Image (cartoon, coloured by chain):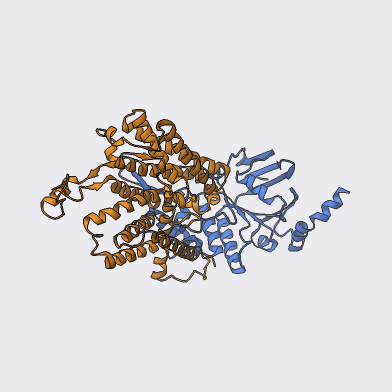
Chain colours: A blue, B orange
């Protein structure tokens, strides 16, 4: 789909034993675009994002990243290819401080004699400026993540992914557990990130949240795509119908 | 476009900030315990040099195993095999050195290698089967105790193997576990009349406390090492993360399994340090040594403010917990209280600590 395609999945099949979770899904993710992936529970959304983030490998099908066919063995390889995933409830560790969370796995270190220690000073000062940029006022980098609200936590997780060079940011149901006010903050964060040129894959089953930020909408149902629409081409009712009405539609098709 | 998040949590007072220190409870506990015994036991000799050495050594014993248990608990796991590991490592040293005639340094190193390998095995089984480490290490509590008695019986027909002192006489490694430091200083202090000397018997003229036992040095060293690794290094960050939320840590690329297995190895290391100091000090190994030590370690850690669910705790706290343990146990002896009441006290203290910790956890995670 054009030259700006960062990631392209073609005819992805994935089966777990006898269960066919994905039956030929194709999707293209472009730079600076928010691509919403909609679907009811069990539609195959989470399998698809796990393939995109390297957790699962497709049974058949092809993944192109920046035009090159790629096989990702594990989340680490996906992260190295610039694909970051923010899972709904797996994003951060509530008992740990914001700073320790932000740098987890990529801690800045310095040497004191022969011993390597974490460089808390540098970690904290970078963290504070990144948080300010994204609009979170932290009192103290050592305050625990648990003291932040749900929306702030999502925002910290998104900021972290972008700071560490994510070109494709996969957000798994980022708003599903949030209230109205928190949701609008997270959606604003998504918009900020997209303006930076990051491609966002926004997974949701909430059509109005998707419509608020999405440039493209792909509806998944029973492991298949029901098509991709651009913003403005489709409205709330049509998306809602595709998501919820797919059962009757597929039954009709099978006759 | 700017986001102005208005619902920042209310600014906590200094008091509430202090409440979030994992070791606060233990700090208060230590102060209270010392205050109490100062008041009721100041004339019993408990706080004389000799008396202090008494509870200091007992506390150090608890500290050595508590440091290992603490890091392991923060990493989200338990090891109930610590006590059996102590018995096992001791018998390995005694059998190889006394019965098989190995040099003691080789016996000690062998005990460390074997114990740490078993620790790695416990960790490996735990992370691979995804079973609670409670169960896996409980299995090893029995396996190791059984093996310990079996090895002792088939090699000597006894469960206590003596004679280690004799074979360890000129060994270079044994003093690191059973020796004393600053002996010269204590002799000098005695000569100056600053500390008492024995007035009769074979030790007449020698100071009542002849030096700082290696055990105490090990305890202090392990506290510094554990605290440093946990709070200052990136590996420490991974320990917190592995216990805080293993799945989230894995997604971010933390080698959670490796961290957990290493913490089991470290716990086994601490158990072997304990075992070795005991064997060298007593000159014998007993197959029933270390019984209930795993619980004493866990209790010290919990009194020190660590959460049983992992992800949160403090090595300093665990050490203070161990000191409370040691001071109270010996202090009750000094004031002549029936020693069985110590267990009652311990049970009550454990319960209070867990309730306090659970409350602190709610404060941190914002859970209602």
Q: Residue at x 26, y 59 (%)?
A: B46
Nearer to me, B93 or B263:
B93
Residue B249, position as x, y percentages in the image:
52, 50
| Residue B50 in sight in this render | yes
Which residue is nearer to you in this view: A9 or A153? A153
Q: Position of residue A61 (x, y in %)?
A: 69, 39
- Residue B276: name its quadrant: top left
Q: Is residue A30 above or below residue B94?
A: below
- Looking at this view, is B217 or B171 the one in front? B171
Asked whether, in this view, residue A91 is left or right of residue A236, the answer is left
Residue occupying the far top of the picture? B101
Residue drawn at the location 22% of the way across and 58% of the way down: B48
Q: Is residue A7 left or right of residue B261?
A: right
**What quarter of the picture does the N terminus of chain A occupy?**
top right
**Image-based side of A185 in relation to A124, left or right:** right
How many marks the image carries: the answer is 0
Residue A216 in the image: state x and y as whole percent.
68, 55
Question: Residue at point 21% right, 50% down?
Answer: B209
């Amino acid at each position: 789909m054009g030259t700006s395609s960062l990631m392209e999945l073609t005819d992805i099949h994935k089966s777990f034993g006898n269960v066919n979770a994905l039956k030929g899904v194709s999707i293209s993710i472009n730079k600076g675009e928010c691509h919403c992936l909609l679907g009811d529970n069990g539609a195959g959304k989470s399998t698809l994002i796990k393939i995109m983030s390297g957790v699962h490998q497709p049974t058949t099908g092809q993944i192109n990243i920046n035009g090159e066919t790629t096989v990702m063995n594990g989340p680490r390889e996906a992260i190295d290819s610039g694909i970051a995933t923010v899972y709904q409830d797996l994003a951060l560790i509530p008992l740990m401080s914001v700073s320790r969370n932000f740098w987890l796995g990529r801690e800045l270190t310095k040497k004191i004699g022969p011993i390597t220690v974490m460089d808390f000073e540098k970690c904290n000062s970078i963290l504070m400026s990144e948080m300010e940029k994204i609009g979170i006022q932290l009192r103290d980098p050592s305050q625990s993540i648990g003291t932040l609200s749900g929306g702030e936590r999502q925002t910290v997780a998104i900021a972290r992914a972008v700071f560490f060079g994510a070109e494709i940011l996969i957000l798994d149901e980022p708003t599903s557990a949030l209230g109205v006010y928190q949701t609008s903050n997270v959606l604003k964060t998504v918009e900020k990130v997209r303006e930076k040129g990051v491609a966002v894959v926004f997974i949701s089953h909430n059509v109005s949240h998707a419509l608020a930020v999405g440039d493209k909408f792909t509806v998944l149902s029973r492991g298949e795509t029901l098509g991709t629409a651009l913003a403005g081409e489709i409205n709330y009712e049509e998306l809602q119908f595709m998501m919820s009405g797919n059962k009757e539609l597929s039954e009709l098709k099978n006759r | 476009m700017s986001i102005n998040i208005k619902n920042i949590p209310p600014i906590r007072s200094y008091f509430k900030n202090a409440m979030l220190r994992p070791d606060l409870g233990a700090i208060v506990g230590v102060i209270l315990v010392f205050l109490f015994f100062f008041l009721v036991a100041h004339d019993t000799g408990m706080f004389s040099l000799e008396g202090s050495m008494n509870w200091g050594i007992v506390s150090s014993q608890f500290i050595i195993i508590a440091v290992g248990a603490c890091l392991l608990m923060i990493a989200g796991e338990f090891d109930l095999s610590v006590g059996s590991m102590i018995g096992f490592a001791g018998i390995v040293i005694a059998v190889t050195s006394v019965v098989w005639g190995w040099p003691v340094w080789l016996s000690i190193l062998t005990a460390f290698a074997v114990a740490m390998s078993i620790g790695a095995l416990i960790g490996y089984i735990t992370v691979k089967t995804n079973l609670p480490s409670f169960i896996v290490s409980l299995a090893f509590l029995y396996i190791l105790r059984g093996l310990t008695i079996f090895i002792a019986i088939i090699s000597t027909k006894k469960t206590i193997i003596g004679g280690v002192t004799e074979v360890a006489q000129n060994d270079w490694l044994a003093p690191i576990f059973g020796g004393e430091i600053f002996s010269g200083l204590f002799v000098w202090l005695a000569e100056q009349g600053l500390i008492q000397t024995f007035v009769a018997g074979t030790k007449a003229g020698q100071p009542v406390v002849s030096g700082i036992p290696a055990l105490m040095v090990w305890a202090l060293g392990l506290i510094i090492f554990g605290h440093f690794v946990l709070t200052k290094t990136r590996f420490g960050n991974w320990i917190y993360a592995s216990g805080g939320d293993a799945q989230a840590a894995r997604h971010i690329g933390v080698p959670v399994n490796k961290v957990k297995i290493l913490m089991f190895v470290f716990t086994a290391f601490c158990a072997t340090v304990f075992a070795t100091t005991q064997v060298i000090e007593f000159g014998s190994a007993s197959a029933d040594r270390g019984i209930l030590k795993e619980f004493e370690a866990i209790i010290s850690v919990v009194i020190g403010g660590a959460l049983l669910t992992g992800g949160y705790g403090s090595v300093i706290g665990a050490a203070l917990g161990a000191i409370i343990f040691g001071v109270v146990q010996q202090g009750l002896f000094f004031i002549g209280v029936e020693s069985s009441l110590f267990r009652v006290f311990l049970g009550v203290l454990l319960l209070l600590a867990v309730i306090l910790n659970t409350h602190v956890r709610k404060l941190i995670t914002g859970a209602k």
